[in-house]
Image (cartoon, grey):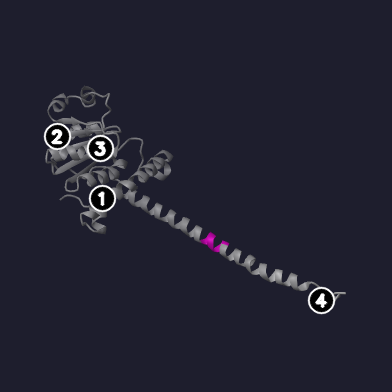
Amino acid sequence: MRQSAFPKDAKPFIVREVTGTAEAPAEAERVPRLRTGVKIAVVAVAATVAVFATGFVLFWNLIEHEPRGDVRRADGIVALTGGEARIPEAVKLLSQGKGRRLLISGVNPATTRRELAVLTPNSQHLFRCCVDVDQARDTVGNAQETSHWATNRRFKSLIVVTASYHMPRSLAELRRTLPDVVLIPYPVRPRNVHVEAWWAYPGTMQLLLSEYMKFIPAFARCYSVQFGRKQGFSGSARQCANVTRPA
């Protein structure tokens, strides 16, 4: 009769011991790894929020509520449509001799020059001699059309008329297409936009956050052009933010 290799009273503790020592370390390692992953995710989210918030504050500081003092004369004036008072203010500047010609950019194809003239009484003679229009659909199109218009007329300086909250993005897009033209901002202050205390007005907060999200890619496009022109890191940023003011 064949005998067993193990005594009859032997207990199969070895199998249980081996099994336990093989599984325990793997299970123990999962918890620290999970905790490390959670910490990394939390740090990444916090860093992203901090960068976003810092960028928003910088963007908000770029918004000018009113034109700076007496606006200097320029070769031309461009008004970017899309809000109240932009066209009347631009026509007023033209009537004051602040520019030789005015471009109204982004006019609805269904809107006639006569209808535009109605917005500014006693301005029909200016529309006959010195006002041009285009039908750009967005701010990128505004910049492209303005670039063609200014380049064809060899303008070296432009007064830019648009809403205050829209001005930083407009200047970034215009700087991208007109890197050597002096841009003089003339912000128009909408009545229902409270930029100074945006945190107290949900509508203004939503508007500024939306504009900030659009400003980021506009600034990046401008920055790539300026950096390619060897303006340097800080120089490119200043150009696209239009920080350096003409004397």
Q: Which residues are magenta?
A: 34-39
Q: Tell me if label 2 and label 3 are in contact, CB under 8 Å.
A: no
Q: Is residue 120 visible?
A: yes
Residue to which mark 3 is pinned: 142
Q: Residue at x 42, y 55 (%)?
A: 50
Q: Which of the two labelled residues, at mark 1 and mark 3, occupies the earlier sequence position? A: 3
- Residue 93 shown left or right of residue 31 in the figure: left
| 106 to 237, vertically: above or below | above
SS at mark 3? Answer: helix
Q: Tell me if label 1 and label 3 are in contact, CB under 8 Å.
A: no
Q: Nearer the viewer, mark 4 or mark 3?
A: 4
Which amino acid is tagged 1?
Cys
Residue 218: image location, x then y, percent: 30, 46
Which amino acid is tagged 3?
Asn
Residue 217: image location, x then y, percent: 33, 47
Crowding around mark 4 (Cα neighbors within 10 Å: few <14, some 14 to 19, many 20+) is: few
Depth check, front residue: 131 or 203 = 131
Residue to which mark 2 is pinned: 101
Residue to which mark 1 is pinned: 240
Depth check, front residue: 150 or 209 = 150
Is residue 36 part of the magenta span, yes or no? yes
Residue to which mark 4 is pinned: 6
Q: Tell me if label 1 and label 4 are in contact, CB under 8 Å.
A: no
Q: Residue at x 25, y 50 (%)?
A: 240
Report, in whole angstroms, how far the alpha carbon at label 1 lies from the one at label 4.
Answer: 85 Å
Q: Tell me if label 4 and label 3 are in contact, CB under 8 Å.
A: no
Residue 3: image location, x then y, percent: 85, 76
Which amino acid is tagged 4?
Phe
